[in-house]
Image (cartoon, rainbow, N blue to C red):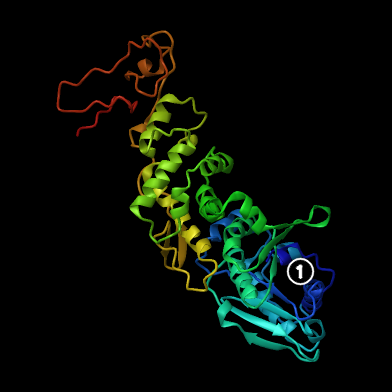
């Protein structure tokens, strides 16, 4: 789909666009060679729907392509609408299955998918086009980033010694480094354009990084943030990658192995997150979250690690890693329901958490940083008739809590307005 996104139409209708695009795609394909044109699918319950909405559809224009004479609208607005992308792929297959396209396909093979099906277009006489479904390439994988490696495997199995993948997507590079050692061919990635165009061997890069690291890269990429899984606030991939290179690889290697994730995997991921926040002595994100809350001079509480409940839902990255890990298999993709998402009446939503991010008492919190003993109105806790608590940064504090004389627990941490909570 990146090819269509970067296309600059120099014609006035879709018929001319189809011929222009076919010529551009096959220009560098040798005789008896093949080219795979792999596109995304756009199911209604896509796990990428929210990401696509986030990228914005302002000004999107839905167009029905009734035939080759249909005039081209604004290309940028046209490509903002997912329904248009489905429409144009269907149109291209029909437009390329004509006598006008046969000379371009003479002694060449073009593989392209329409939804979950894949077809091979070719011509042996330059007069007519043969269209054949290829069952081995049928797949329910939604993303071309994943599906493209199934095509690479098919090409290698058909005798190709080198497979060149043209894609600007980071996901493709990450999956490619993992898949390189599992394909019986040289895998090459072609990125950039013009003077910035680069071609490099994924296999050579994979060998320099090591097989163990490369095998865990898709899982690592999913866990630390991708299109379908959020990242950790204030924690970039570089710091987490250093952990990976320093041997903290077990959790990432196991991620995506099974659905749902095992208890052992969840615990390993929790320990990895603690190390991402620089606290190797902690193995519980709840304890680490409390520790950082009380001791760190955070500019924002968004910089705290997630609670265990939120982290459990974040392991939706396990589902994404599972898809990437099975990129060489044409098998059916399982539903994302209960893997960090919920499907309700055909609509898909992300489950961020099932519990409150903090006790209700904590959400009414106030704390001070006094240096004068907290014994007058300058102290916000004293002024509000509250005892200072664990989150306060005060010194020589004289505003300490008094134990209750009745069967009620007095909590130090919540700075509540004269509230008590009975056990």
Which picture quadrant has residue 38? bottom right
Secondary structure found at label 1: loop
Residue 112 percent location from the top left of the image: 66, 76
Which picture quadrant has residue 373? top left
Residue 44 percent location from the top left of the image: 52, 68
Note whether residue 316 is visible: no
Residue 248 percent location from the top left of the image: 47, 43
- Is 17 placed above or below 53 here? below
- Is 44 placed above or below 341 here? below
Callout 1: few (<14), some (14-19), or many (20+) C-alpha neighbours within 10 Å? Answer: some
Q: Quadrant of the N terminus?
A: bottom right
Q: How many marks?
A: 1
- Is 242 placed above or below 39 here? above
Residue corresponding to mark 1:
73
Q: Nearer the viewer, residue 323 or 79?
A: 323
Q: Nearer the viewer, residue 51 or 176?
A: 176
Q: Nearer the viewer, residue 370 or 277?
A: 277
Q: Residue at x 49, y 28 (%)?
A: 298
- Is 409 placed above or below 372 here? below
Q: Residue at x 67, y 65 (%)?
A: 186
Q: Residue at x 38, y 49 (%)?
A: 266
Is residue 297 left or right of 77 when viewed as pictured? left
Residue 299 percent location from the top left of the image: 52, 29
């Amino acid at each position: 789909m990146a090819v269509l996104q970067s296309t600059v139409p120099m014609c006035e209708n879709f018929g001319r666009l189809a011929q222009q695009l076919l010529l551009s795609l096959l220009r560098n394909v040798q005789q008896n060679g093949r080219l795979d044109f792999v596109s995304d699918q756009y199911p209604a319950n896509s796990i990428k729907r929210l990401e696509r909405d986030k990228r914005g559809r302002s000004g999107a224009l839905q167009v029905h392509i009734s035939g080759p004479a249909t005039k081209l609208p604004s290309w940028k607005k046209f490509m903002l609408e997912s329904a248009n992308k489905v429409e144009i792929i269907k149109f291209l297959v029909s437009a390329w299955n004509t006598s006008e396209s046969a000379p371009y396909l003479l002694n060449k093979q073009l593989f392209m998918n329409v939804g979950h099906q894949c077809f091979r277009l070719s011509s042996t006489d330059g007069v007519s086009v043969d269209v054949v479904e290829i069952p081995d390439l049928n797949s329910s994988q939604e993303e071309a980033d994943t599906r493209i490696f199934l095509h690479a495997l098919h090409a290698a199995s058909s005798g190709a010694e080198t497979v060149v993948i043209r894609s600007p997507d980071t996901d493709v590079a990450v999956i490619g480094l993992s898949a390189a050692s599992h394909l019986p061919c040289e895998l090459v990635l072609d990125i950039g354009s013009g003077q910035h165009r680069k071609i490099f061997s994924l296999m050579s890069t994979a060998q320099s990084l090591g097989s163990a690291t490369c095998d865990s890269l898709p899982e690592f990429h999913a866990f630390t943030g991708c299109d379908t899984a959020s990242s950790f606030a204030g924690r970039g991939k570089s710091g987490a990658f250093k952990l990976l290179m320093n041997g903290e690889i077990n959790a990432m290697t196991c991620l995506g192995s099974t659905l749902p994730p095992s208890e052992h995997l969840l615990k390993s991921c929790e320990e990895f997150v603690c190390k991402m926040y620089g606290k190797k002595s902690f193995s519980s994100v709840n304890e680490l979250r409390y520790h950082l809350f009380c001791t760190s001079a955070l500019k924002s509480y968004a910089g705290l690690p997630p609670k265990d409940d939120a982290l459990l839902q974040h392991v939706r990255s396990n589902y994404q890693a599972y898809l990437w890990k099975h990129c060489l298999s044409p098998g059916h993709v399982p539903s994302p329901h209960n893997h960090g998402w919920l499907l309700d009446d055909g609509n898909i939503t992300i489950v961020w958490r099932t519990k409150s991010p903090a006790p209700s008492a904590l959400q009414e919190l106030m704390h001070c940083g006094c240096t004068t003993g907290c014994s007058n109105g300058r102290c916000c806790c004293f002024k509000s008739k509250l005892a200072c608590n664990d989150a306060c940064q005060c010194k020589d504090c004289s505003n300490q809590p008094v134990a209750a004389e009745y069967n009620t627990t007095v909590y130090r941490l919540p700075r509540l307005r004269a509230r008590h909570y009975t056990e």
